[in-house]
Image (cartoon, helix red, strand yellow):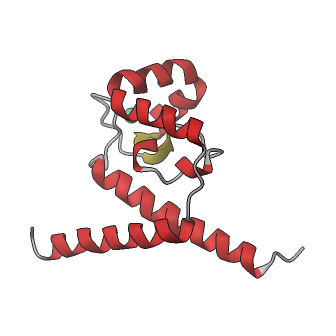
Amino acid sequence: MKRSKKARQKEYLELELDALARIRCFERDGYKCVVAGCNRTNIQWCHVESRIYKSLQWDFDNNLTMCAGHHLWWHKNLRESGQWFAATYPERDAYLTIRKRMKTKIDRKELLVALRAERNDREFLVQEGL
Ligand SMILES: [Zn+2]
């Protein structure tokens, strides 16, 4: 079945949001797994709260960089990994708890504009050696 133009546009928009949010997360975390002492290099873009919470999918505080091994550990041990997150990032954990309850609708186009601008700012700073 052919999807509508609107559905395809939404899919492209979400793919670009994923790409921009992933890079932003990797840059913040230094392209390393955030688990202390982990030096594995097969990094992945991870979500604290599942992607079913659409409003949190691209939220900086909901994104983590982890190696594939720790990402798997995360999903297989949700209780333990949730406790680890709360102990490691208490402010982010509190924020996400509130955001989850609020169920805020996000404006994908507005977010895309903001993430593109942020990326351009970072590229400018790198180019200028700042
Ligand atoms: Zn790791």
Q: Which residue is at 50% across, 32% downward?
A: 97
Could you say where residue 2 lies in the image, as x and y percent from the top left? 86, 77
* Residue nearest the viewer, comparing 35 with 4: 4
Q: Position of residue 104 (x, y in %)?
A: 57, 49
Q: Residue at x 30, y 46 (%)?
A: 29
80 left or right, relative to 30: right
* Residue 103 as seen in the image, left or right of residue 119: right
Residue 19 visible in the picture? yes
Examine the rendered structure and indicate whether residue 90 appears above or below residue 99: above
Q: How many numbered discs sit on the rendered protein?
A: 0
Image quadrant of ligand 1 equals top left
Residue 21, percent from left and from top: 44, 58
User: Which of these two is toward me, 104 or 52?
Assistant: 104
Judge whether 55 appears above or below 9 on screen.
above
Nearest to the observer: residue 12 or residue 109? 109
Residue farthest along the right direction in this orientation: 1
Q: Is residue 89 at all visible to an observer of this figure?
A: no
With 24 as the anchor, is 97 left or right in this view? Answer: right
The quarter in which the C terminus is drawn is: bottom left
Identity of the residue furthest to the bottom in this view: 5
> From what the image shows, is residue 4 above or below residue 48?
below
Q: Is residue 60 left or right of residue 1?
A: left
Q: Quadrant of the N terminus?
A: bottom right
Q: Residue at (11%, 76%) from the top-left corner?
A: 128
- Residue 24 sits in quarter: bottom left
